[in-house]
Image: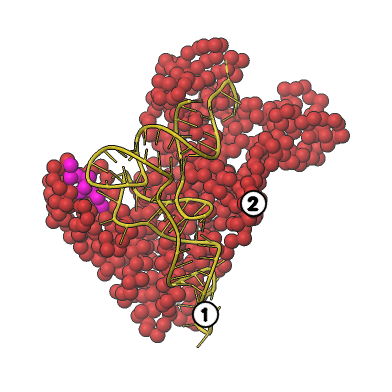
Amino acid sequence: MAATRVFRDPNMGLNVTDSLSDALKAALAGAGLEAPDEVLWEVPREEAHGDYATNVAMLLAKGARRPPREVAQLLRQHFPPVPQVQKVEVAGPGFLNVFLAPDWCSTALGEILEAGESYARSDRGRGSRVQIEFVSANPTGPLVVANARAAAVGDSLTRILAAQGYRVFREYYVNDAGNQVQTLARSLEARIRQQLGEQAELPEDAYPGEYLVELAREHLATGGSKILAAPDGERLDRLGRFAVERITADQRRVLGAYGVEFDRWFSERALRESGEAARVLERLRERGYVYEAEGAVWFRSTAFGDDKDRVLVKSDGEPTYFVSDIAYHVNKIERGFERLIDLWGPDHHGHVPRMKAALRALGYAEGLLDVLIVQLVSLLRQGQPVRMSKRMGEFVTMEELIEEVGRDAARFTFLTRRHDSPLDFDLEVVTRQTAENPVYYVQYAHARIASIFQHLRERKLPLPDWQRVDLLRLSLPEEQSLIKRLLQLPHVAAGAARALEPHRIAYYLQELAGLFHPYYNRHRVIGDDRALTEARLALVAGVGLVVRNGLDLLGVSAPEKM
RNA sequence: GCGCCCGUAGCUCAGUUGGAUAGAGCGUCGGACUUCGAAUCCGAAGGUCGAAGGUUCGAUUCCUUCCGGGCGUACCA
């Protein structure tokens, strides 16, 4: 699987901000200043403020007991010469503004082309193992739009982390145990009886969706009416397993069509049967965080900052799902993952403190688990909210969404929002504006570039050897801007990985396309000047490459034709 | 009541450990295809960053209070 490959960075010097940080460390040492944990470089809004800037002097000013500008001046004086940098300026209240050397940038374009698919990848993660769990929808019905959002975010995060050298493992937790499966079984039974002409009412809390009518028909078609004679326990167990298996298979199919594959589908039922849950309970008890009250068994999660203690075993003797959940996370850790990332829905956000409390109670490090809350998607149609409720049996499925909007547009739209920001998605608008969707703006840049090279082939013109192209011919301001933007990808990709924010890639790509299209519109790539033509071909090849690499991090295709 | 998320242009959203003159897409208005793809480009209009205080060299960003929206607050999952 591509996402789990480990990459060695073949082009370290191409990560400009890494090089700048190294230089700054030398400057700090030279100036006798203490280096902060991490230096962050930002890309200033104003061109006059350089290509990169840092506020490190202002942060150090207080500790050094000197004015910020003086600290900045000191750092500037000790800034070692590096090939990437033309000049360093002290500006404003104490910024260090770095201006890149144009000649170095032009040459770097050649290295970007040389790096190809591995451009902007790094080995920052050093092969450490990360497990990311997402979607994990209940196996009681089809996937819905919110699941499509989680799938897009989770899959993209996997790609982004893998590109930084982490070994990422995608997992889907199947809640195939507990009350809801019983309910599902009873719902299915009622549907089967209805097919047989019996007067069977759906149970009060049943899943009313049409898909169970379909499943009932399927079950009967495979000779499944005998089961109705079986005793309660066996009947419901078998119907439950049947329904879960079919629904899960359907979920896997829809996710596959969306381009999302999981490395493992982890069964809660198997976890319970393995006895791991009981073992976790015992460990908590040994550590003194378990007590009994009101006939139930409680976890003292308040010892780790939770609002209140939580029930582990109900008074009827059944463990709560919380126990399974803890056991599942312990299972992950024992499989050797060094970092866990969970994507949860907003209806679970209250559960984050207790889950973290449980892991800490068991003695695990605090930062081991990151829980990202993927907010809801409010689906609108013609400006009117579409009511979605599994309980009511009304919803727009993930499959319908993909059919209506398209896989790339759906994924890109989800990835242009922060995961924790609620999202309005008007089907009518997105469908109508398909052609103007930002994803096509980015993809179109790629297709246009592909067609330049197609044009080259049609006219039987030779493809230049990138090593021998005179890249210094790229002297237009627009060309320099484009190259500098291409050089930002390693910084953006690393930032997206650090912050777990795929949308940074999506915005970067829109900005890159926003530089490319005007350039393309104004200047011809293929012209009479052979050397200039070759240089511009190198430039647009670089843009195409970066767009392709960037879209790949989002799991969106980069078409040659549209 | 308590907790979490959110409130930025008409709409949907960005805004990088607090930083320099707050951005994009859509929508609206006006222009550009005999030349590598017009799913594009050029230009215009559009803002009390929900409100009020506070912290400091500096606040859309941090703190407090209030207003508004969403979600939690189960011996359901």
Quick check: A27 above or below A292?
below
Q: Measuring 40% from the left and 20% from the top, which residue is drawn there?
A: A303
Assign a secondary structure to mark 1: helix
Instruction: Say yes or no: labels 1 and 2 on the same chain.
Output: yes
Q: Position of residue A274 (x, y in %)?
A: 56, 25
| Residue A530 numbered mark, or none | none
Q: Measuring 50% from the left and 64% from the top, which residue is drawn there?
A: A441
Q: Position of residue A464 (x, y in %)?
A: 39, 76
> Given the image, on which type of amino acid does mark 2 rest?
Arg
Q: Measuring 32% from the left and 72% from the top, which residue is drawn there?
A: A477
Tag 2 subunit? A
Residue under pointer 2: A381
Tag 1 subunit? A
Image-based side of A425 in relation to A195, left or right: left
Residue A264 can be seen, yes or no:
no
Magenta stretch: dominant SS?
A: helix
| Residue A458 numbered mark, or none | 1
Q: Distance between the residues labelled 1 and 2?
A: 45 Å
Q: Position of residue B28 (x, y in %)?
A: 55, 66
Residue A122 is inside the magenta segment: no
What is the letter of the yellow chain? B
Assign a secondary structure to mark 2: strand
> Given the image, on which type of amino acid does mark 1 rest?
Glu
Nearer the observer, A15 or B39: B39
- Please provide the residue range marked out in magenta: A54-62
Quick check: A372 above or below A411?
above
Q: Measuring 77% from the left and 39% from the top, which residue is drawn there?
A: A213
Q: For chain A, what colour was chosen?
A: red
Residue A469 can be seen, yes or no:
yes
